[in-house]
Image: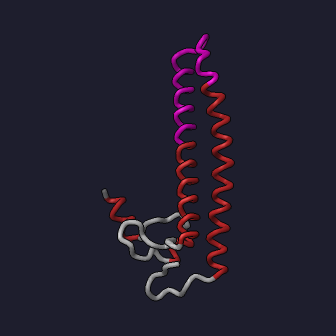
Amino acid sequence: MVVKEGEGAWTKSELKEVLDELRRQYAHSTAIVQAQEAELSGLLRDAGDGAGQDQADMGATSFERDHELTVLNNERDKLAQIDRALARIDDGTYGVCESCGNPIGKMRLMAFPRATLCMTCKQREERR
């Protein structure tokens, strides 16, 4: 795997630490997705029963449903990022910035194992 200039090569223990963290995040996000899907299913099922609800109740239900959808979509995005990181580890491209092709850096990847951009490219993306 690629490293920045001045960094040592990835050790087995460092790689294991990253893999363990990705797997932990995957399990956590999967549990959240399952819970959110069940919650959202209940909200959608109850949404058709508007009898006796005033506008404030319907608004609160709509807000809660939108919030659940946002959380669900964010967790699904995390799962996709984790899958991508694991695939990049398998194919040997983990640690290469997807924008500029330079090394991302071990410290950044250890802190945020789903990273696909080096700090320079990430900062540039966030300024847009």
Q: Quadrant of residue 125?
A: bottom left
Above or below: residue 81 compared with residue 104: above
Q: Image check: 119 left or right of 111? A: left
Number of labels in the image equals: 0
Q: Quadrant of residue 97?
A: bottom left
Tell me the magenta residue range.
Answer: 45-70
Which residue is at the front of the view, 14 or 56? Answer: 14
The answer to whether residue 109 is seen in the rendering is yes
Which residue is at the front of the view, 93 or 82? Answer: 93
Above or below: residue 38 compared with residue 90: above
- Measuring 62% from the left and 63% from the top, which residue is drawn there? 22
Q: Is residue 53 magenta?
A: yes
Prevailing secondary structure of the magenta residues? helix
Position in image of residue 83 (x %, y %)? 57, 58
Q: Image check: 33 left or right of 108? A: right
Which residue is at the front of the view, 119 or 117? Answer: 117
Quick one: which residue is furthest to the top in this view?
51
Above or below: residue 64 compared with residue 121: above
Position in image of residue 25 (x %, y %)? 64, 59
Position in image of residue 128 (x %, y %)? 30, 56
The answer to whether residue 112 is seen in the rendering is no
- Measuring 53% from the left and 50% from the top, which residue is drawn there? 77
Quick one: which residue is furthest to the left in this view?
128
Position in image of residue 69 (x %, y %)? 54, 37
Q: Is residue 107 magenta?
A: no
- Measuring 57% from the left and 82% from the top, which residue is drawn there? 10
